[in-house]
Image (spheres, helix red, strand yellow):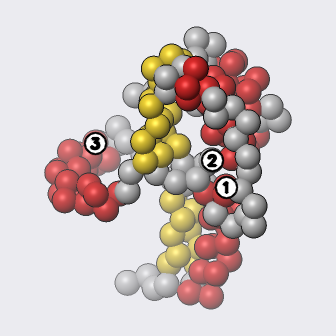
Amino acid sequence: MFDEAFNYKEEPDLDVALKRYFSEGIDIYFENVGGKMLDAVLLNMRVHGRVAVCGMISQYNLEQPEVLHHIMSVVWKQIRIEGFLVFDYYHLYPKFLEFVLPYIKEGKITYVEDIAEGLESAPEAMVGLFSGRNVGKQVVVVAHE
């Protein structure tokens, strides 16, 4: 469940966007972008907010990672930031499937796939992941069998 959402790629000022959508601040943030997005989020977190970090894709291919200007928000607002790896929870995958598959079958959960056709399109599709070109889950179809 979530209150609001927006496409960070379409917002010229992330701080303004966050204030517009989350005027009372952010309680919980799932981090997988990093850089300017994380910096704006830290500025807009509520006291005792929580950030779960699984990645920072905007930083992966940079020679010099972007500086976080609002990192002191972690101290001032007593924000809890914790990283996690999906592999730590892989043992729960069967339970997750048992829970989520009925919702998918009922159409209560939908998802978007960005499908690239053919193995020859795989390198471009992979590069697209890191540049933000794709929308949803990137899939490369190598055979229709």
Q: Mark 2 and mark 3 in contact (Cβ < 8 Å)?
A: no
Q: Is residue 106 left or right of residue 37?
A: left
Q: Mark 3, mark 2: which one is toward the viewer? A: 2
- How far is disc 1 from disc 3 in space, using C-alphas? 31 Å
| Amino acid carrying mark 1 in the image | Ser
Q: State how far apart marks 3 and 2 are (Cα).
A: 30 Å
Q: Quadrant of residue 14?
A: top right
Q: Residues within 10 Å of mark 1 (few under 14, many from 20)?
A: some
Q: Quadrant of residue 1?
A: top left
Give the percent coordinates (x, y) of residue 62.
73, 64
Check the image and report above or below for 37 versus 95. above
Please tell me which of labels 1 and 2 falls first in the chain: 2
Q: Which residue is mark 2?
A: 34
Any part of residue 38 in sight = yes
Q: Residue furthest right?
A: 12
User: Which of disc 3 and disc 1 is earlier in sequence?
Assistant: 1
Q: Are marks 1 and 2 in contact (CB under 8 Å)?
A: yes
Q: Which residue is nearer to you in this view: 58 or 119?
A: 58
Q: Residues within 10 Å of mark 2 (few under 14, many from 20)?
A: many
Tell me which label, 3 or 2, sits earlier in the chain. 2
Q: Say what secondary structure mark 2 lies in.
A: loop
Residue for point 74% across, 51% down: 66
